[in-house]
Amino acid sequence: MTNDDLALRVAALKVVSDYTTRRYNEARAEAAERMERGDRLMARSPLAGVKVGAVSKSDPKPVARVTDEKAFTDWVRKNYPDRMVYDFDVIGSTQEVVSVLFEHAPHLLRKITKPDPELVREIRADSVGLGAPVGPAGEADVDGLEVTTPDGIVSCKPDPEALAAVVDLIRADKLSLEGLVRAELPGGAE
């Protein structure tokens, strides 16, 4: 194999890989629209019933996340000032910090206050449990925090024998590469 042949092989495989990855992601998005959270489907070959792979949609739990760091910090500072902790912002360049920070340049550190990470974990956990933002004393007006449930994500776990099953389907004219990636490939017949 010449270098030109090798370069063509690598480039062609990359083009096909990128294209099929896009099509796979589009098919997953289509499946996400049709599947319910927590669904699991098993793809089987119509030839011999061999498993090709499991397609599933995750069922994520609600999460509480800080959406506005400043608003949340201001809320904690106002309502729980004793739960603010000191931390440091690095204000020097990376080169300065790497070479001299700990030993020779404490002036490159600035002391700041921020909500105690344990308080943040507590508020987030309590908010997830309630399904809405809630402070430690039951406050319902926690600034900068929201509780959401992420969309489920569709994934596929191919069976270890899936490649052979798919090749058998293609050889038996039950599947085609064109049919898998698009009814008509770009530049194909109209």
Image (cartoon, rainbow, N blue to C red):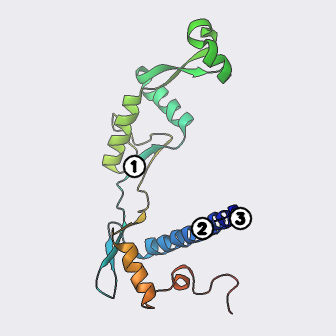
Mark 3: amino acid: Asp
Look at mark 1 in the image and give the residue it sits on.
63
Dots 2 and 3: beta carbons under 8 Å? Answer: no
**Mark 2 secondary-structure assignment:** helix
Q: Position of residue 18 (x, y in %)?
A: 60, 66
Q: Nearer the viewer, residue 50 or 96?
A: 50
Residue 135 in sight from this viewpoint = no
Q: Position of residue 171 (x, y in %)?
A: 44, 87
**Mark 3 secondary-structure assignment:** helix
Look at mark 3 in the image and give the residue it sits on.
4
Counting residues from the start of the chain, the first of labels 2 and 1 encountered is 2
Look at mark 2 in the image and give the residue it sits on.
13
Cα separation, mark 2 vs mark 3, equals 14 Å
Q: Is residue 1 above or below residue 147?
A: below
Mark 1: amino acid: Val
Q: Which quarter of the picture shows residue 95?
A: top right
Q: Is residue 15 above or below residue 178?
A: above
Q: Is residue 190 above or below residue 146?
A: below
The label shown at residue 141 is none
From the viewer's perspective, tell me whether residue 66 is left or right of residue 182: left
Q: Position of residue 59 (x, y in %)?
A: 34, 61
Residue extending farthest to the front is: 1
Where the C terminus falls, by quadrant?
bottom right
Q: Residue drawn at (41%, 29%), measured in percent from left and top?
A: 117
